Image (spheres, rainbow, N blue to C red):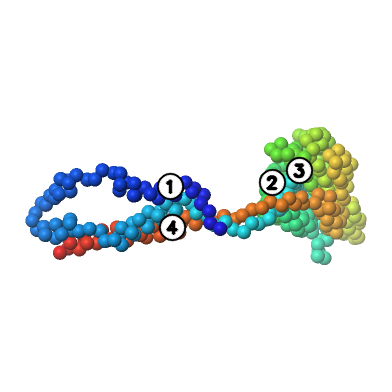
Amino acid sequence: MIQFAWPWALLLLPLPYLIYRLAPPALAAEEAALWVPQLEHFGLARHQQGSRRPRWAVFLALFCWLLLVLACARPQWLGEPLEMPISGRDLLMAVDLSGSMQIEDFDLGGRQVDRLTALKSVAEPFIEQRVGDRLGLILFGEQAYVQVPLSFDRATVRQLLDEAAIGLAGDRTAIGDAIGLALKRAEEGEARRQVLILLTDGANTAGVLPPLKAAELAARKGLKIYTIGIGAEEMEVPSFFFSRTVNPSRDLDEKSLKAIAETTGGRYFRARDRAELEEIYGLLDQLEPVERQQDVYRPVTALFFWPLGAALIGVVVLVLRELLPRLFARTL
């Protein structure tokens, strides 16, 4: 259906008629006066003075006025009602980019990849499935940065996570500062509607805010934190004569990560390989499902440029009708 955004503009339609009826007519003396610098072509000038506009020009001028008023009323086309899913949840992801994330202890398609690459391969499908949620991305190392503020633009979150590089925020790990930054962003909205997923492979070695203190502040605000410890427990390291087995996750502070999750009402997960990481994201989908609240939306398409364009064409025709005879008269 068609509606007008400014229907009051239609009150201007009778304006030309009111001016014609109410405005005082021009003085007869002024109408009769004709100053001619020379008598050449005087007969032609007198003939043009006494001529009247044809009816089609009058009707075209009135039609142009009608089109201009319609354009001022801003006609709009309302599309069919669409049901849009609206989520009541804000989901923040805090990803560790410290130097230890470059350890290649994850298997991806038969090849060894670093922890960040494995994280991206699992997190990106998870982001794609969060239709209706607002997503945000925090990257942290020695410093914590908001890479993407809370947004419905899942494509941007996925792209900027894919572009994240190890060491971008420093080689050490500031877990407490990452939580503090999430809390700072939560103050702008309702923290109780927000969830933080913290992914790290180490312990807090940088920053000014202790992780447990940050967890206490998050609990007061109502921010729930899910912590995920990344890294295999066994890894074969080749040497000159033989290979030896090492624990690449010996620096992972599981005790603190569990305490952070328990303090805020979340859970701690351990991802030793890609399969466990995928399982964790599946559990997060169950623990924090997308809240779908239907909202009706009707797309609006502006139509004002059609009557406006037609009016401009009509005005051009009227101007040419007035100018062309004068141009031809001067060339005679």
Reading the image, the residue beneath label 1 is 11
Considering the numbered disc 4 on the image, is that residue within a helix, a strand or a loop? helix
Residue type at mark 4: give it: Pro
Badge 2: residue crowd in 10 Å (few <14, some 14–19, many ≥20) = some
- Frontmost residue, 170 versus 1: 1
The answer to whether residue 97 is seen in the rendering is: no
Reading the image, the residue beneath label 4 is 307
Quarter-of-image position of residue 196: top right
Per the model, the C-alpha gap separating discs 3 and 4 is 48 Å
Labels 2 & 1 near each other (Cβ < 8 A): no
The tag earlier along the polypeptide, 2 or 4, is 2
Residue type at mark 1: give it: Leu
Return the x and y of residue 80 as percentages of the image width and height: 62, 59
Quarter-of-image position of residue 155: bottom right
State left or right for residue 268 relative to residue 102.
Answer: right
Reading the image, the residue beneath label 2 is 150
The tag earlier along the polypeptide, 3 or 2, is 2
Badge 1: residue crowd in 10 Å (few <14, some 14–19, many ≥20) = few
Considering the numbered disc 2 on the image, is that residue within a helix, a strand or a loop? strand
Placement of 215 over or under 329, stated as above or below: above
Reading the image, the residue beneath label 3 is 194
Return the x and y of residue 124 as percentages of the image width and height: 74, 57
Per the model, the C-alpha gap separating discs 2 and 1 is 45 Å
Nearest to the eye among marks 3 and 4: give it: 4
Labels 3 & 2 near each other (Cβ < 8 A): no
The tag earlier along the polypeptide, 3 or 4, is 3
Nearest to the eye among marks 1 and 3: give it: 1
Which residue is found at the position 51% from the left and 49% from the top?
A: 5
